[in-house]
Image (cartoon, helix red, strand yellow):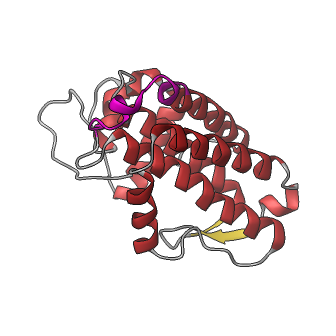
Amino acid sequence: MSARTHADSLRWVAHGTALFTAQVARLDEQQTAQPSLLPGWTRKHVVAHVAANADALGNLVRWARTGERTPMYASAEQRNADIESGAQRPVTELVTWLEASVHELGAAMAALTGEQWRTEIVTAQGRTVPATEIPWLRAREVCVHAVDLGTGTTFADLPDDFLNALVADIRTKRGLGEVPGGPLPEVAAYLAGRPHSLADVADLGPWL
């Protein structure tokens, strides 16, 4: 496992959020309607997903703060419906939603006490983890999806320590004994199921 810390994850959330929102801010209506790097999704789908994810993780923060069980999503079907609905919004509305969700999640996390951060919560995948895992879940979303927007940002633009933590995380989740050699950004892209330059490697399928 990676030696990432809670402080590391919070730092990567800030970095990835700034990277993602800066790219979205440069896109107009026509550009956001164009395909992203994710099959079947436009850039609007990616923005809607990242905004909805902030709202969903906010539910976990509320769980940690109050002790009241608050799942990320009502159901997988509702999650998908919210993304599809969001992808039909004008870009101005999408940006407003993204900015509000980012601000609310950041403020909610900043308000948690040390004891509240240790509260056990359950992720959308059904894993029981301490609330300190929430920033890592968000860091993965904003950093990886900043690449998925397809505006020129690549895994090489992400911090090396984040990439090392990402490789360790995906390697564990995929149950891989070994990972291929190569430049760190390309290895991370490969493990994440994104376009990469590695040769003679097996297709791992989608991940996040």
- 194, 72: nearer the viewer: 72
Going 32% across and 51% down the picture, which residue do you hit?
177
Going 46% across and 51% down the picture, which residue do you hit?
49
- 161, 111: nearer the viewer: 111
Q: Residue furthest left?
A: 200
- 34, 39: nearer the viewer: 34
Residue 141 can be seen in this image:
yes
Horizontal and vertical percent position of residue 62: 75, 65
> Is 195 drawn above or below residue 71 in the view shown?
above
Q: Is residue 36 left or right of residue 2?
A: left
Horizontal and vertical percent position of residue 148: 36, 37
Q: Is residue 23 left or right of residue 195?
A: right
Instruction: Report the number of numbered marks.
Output: 0
Residue 179 can be seen in this image:
no
Q: Is residue 161 left or right of residue 135?
A: left
Horizontal and vertical percent position of residue 77: 40, 73
Instruction: Assess whether residue 152 is covered by the magenta stretch.
Output: no
> Is 12 drawn above or below residue 118 in the view shown?
above
- 108, 4: nearer the viewer: 108
Going 64% across and 48% down the picture, which residue do you hit?
101
> Is 19 drawn above or below residue 9 in the view shown?
above
Horizontal and vertical percent position of residue 11: 68, 33
Q: Which residues are magenta?
A: 22-37
Going 60% across and 41% down the picture, which residue do you hit?
96
Instruction: Assess whether residue 34 is covered by the magenta stretch.
Output: yes
